[in-house]
Image: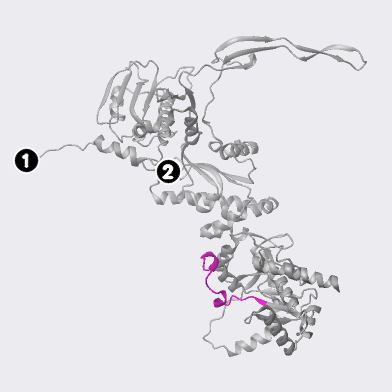
Amino acid sequence: MAEKHGSLSINSDNIFPIIKKWLYSDHDIFVRELVSNGCDAVTKLKKLDVMGEYTLPDDYKPEIHIIVDPEKKTLKFIDNGLGMTADEVEEYITQIAFSGATQFLEQYKDKTTDDQIIGHFGLGFYSAFMVADEVHIDTLSYKEGATAVHWTCDGGTEYDMQDGDKTTVGTEITLFLNEESVEFANEYRMREVLQKYCSFMPVNIYLAKENQEQEYETIDESELREDDVVVEHIHEDAKTEEKENDKGEKEVVEVSPAKDKVKINKRPVSLSNPHPLWMKHPNECTEEEYKEFYRTVFMDYKEPLFWIHLNMDYPFNLKGILYFPKINTEYDSIEGTIKLYNNQVFIADNIKEVIPEFLLLLKGVIDCPDLPLNVSRSALQNDGFVQKISEYITKKVADKLTGMCKTDRESYEKYWDDISPFIKFGCIKDNKFADKMHDYILFKNIDGKYLTLKDCIEENKKDQNVEEKAEDTKEAEEKKEETSDDKKEPEKTTIFYVTDEIQQSQYINMFREAGKDAVIMKHNIDAPFITHLEQKDEHVQFKRIDADLSEEMKEDAAIDEDTVKKLTDIFRTSLKKDKLEVKVEKLKNAGVAAMVTLSEESRRMQDMMKMYNMYGMDPSMFGGQETLILNANHPLVQYVAEHTDGENTSMICEQLYDLAMMSHKQLSPEEMTKFVKRSNDILLKLAEA
């Protein structure tokens, strides 16, 4: 066989089923593709005008019209862009996967830098065959002497092309919808799709229904425009009323001046905003514009706390606005929306490759024309480049937050309770973000004052120095027994925290009386965030306020061992808890009879067990039992110690234990039922006494 040289071609028998079933995950996306092609055509024509290769008519208005016809089950997309010649239809339409926009940019790359052409993807037009049995194209090129073209294809291997009768420059695409897709011939359904994908495309987009009755509106004559179609002129005489003046005399007063109005054909309203706020320079945007944009795009009528306007041209083009919304729910139910655009064309919501995971909790828009999208614009390519975009967004957010903390600390503190979940989640997920934000994380203490981590460490060091001095002698003795090979543990500063200000109010009061401080950490994100901070800084550790008793809360006085044993036995017996750990201390606060502590390690182990649904395991396996601390200075505790066989001693023990537990954690339904009944019994005994 002689050597033969040829070229490969794509067989539409093979490619069409792929387009129809697999290329696009959402069938409504054909609207985005066809409107985008129309925008491209308009943009190209305007570029040619700028470069002097074509002169636009004086009354030229770039626009795209979509016309639905539910009776004929058709859908039309009409643009007044540059149109196509027969050769161009042959090249751009019949050669599947050829990108006309790419070639256009290559041809004129030295003549213009305004890269606003959307269609980098040659298959966009063929998305129409996902919903249509047949597609027609009527087009007329801007080129002088061009002949109109009529092209038809039924989604098979063949097409027909002949001279057309279109008289205006541009392209009209008609879709004859299949039975499964007739919904798109419905005006309201099409409006919904256009608002989803085309709200901010760079050309005005209008939707109409075929053979729809003409609608009218009346305006003041002074508002009349040259392109308005006048139906009639209306003169309204001045309106007067008879009123009584200051002198009590009646006179005729003009309450509405004479008006000249005009009845006109109702002006079409564009479904797109060609100049969205994010495309403007931040200095050109007002506070009200930012808020109005937020309300319009996200249908959220609660004002955002603040926003970050992204505006970058190098090393890649990226613009956008990120809003920090006010949070009224728990962290785990927050859902944000980051809309991703490519040259004002909507791509998707919350693409994690571009948007850092923690910022998915925010609301906003990001427009990046340089995104390396695949042919259907539904997935990203070139991970390295996308990662740089993600890192830039993270950096801009960190810069905004740290800058606010430095220059407007008052506002930063005011927003902190709402924005802290975003920041803490970001610190856990992104080490670079955590490093930038480390000195700007705030902690609200029990007196409502906001402190940085450095402030917290300094405050708690003062308290711990007092405790350390009291234990210096004991520690010195222990250190003598250590061998020289033992590694010295780093000194840790303990920061106490509160998870429920109401439930733990007893502990908070004791802390205040002892001159100690604690911070409020009641969000779901705080538990993993505490662990994150401890891993980042080995010199700090967190303990819940009821994890232990500090020396400042106790009197330095010995307690009789016999009393300790009696109290331990009677409480274990009364509560039917043989392994209950009981400690007897002399607390400075004589008003506290009993309290419960649980070591921080045990609490975290219990939390982990709950997280992984390990409810069947016994917490005591990990040292997870609470410790009951009895105040030897309290009369009730003294009464129990002196009346171990008393008639009401067991009831008092149970009540003291439940009261202590209620300040520590919630009672179970069964425990609460017993507590309420016992409280009633105690009140009855008091009433009978």
> Is residue 452 visible in this depiction of the protein?
yes
Q: Residue at x 53, y 64 (%)?
A: 611
The residues colored magenta run 608-627
For residue 106, which quarter of the picture?
top left
Q: Quadrant of the C terminus?
A: bottom right
The residue lying toward the viewer, choosing from 572 and 95, is 572
Q: Which residue is mark 2?
A: 371
For residue 623: magenta? yes
The residue lying toward the viewer, choosing from 517 and 510, is 510
Distance (Cα) linking label 2 and label 1:
48 Å
Q: Which residue is mark 1?
A: 1
Q: Secondary structure at mark 2?
A: loop
- Check disc 1 and give the amino acid type: Met
- Check disc 2 and give the amino acid type: Leu
For residue 99: magenta? no
Q: Earlier in the sequence, mark 2 or mark 1?
A: 1
User: Total of numbered circles in the picture?
Assistant: 2
In the image, residue 213 lies at what x, y percent?
A: 51, 17
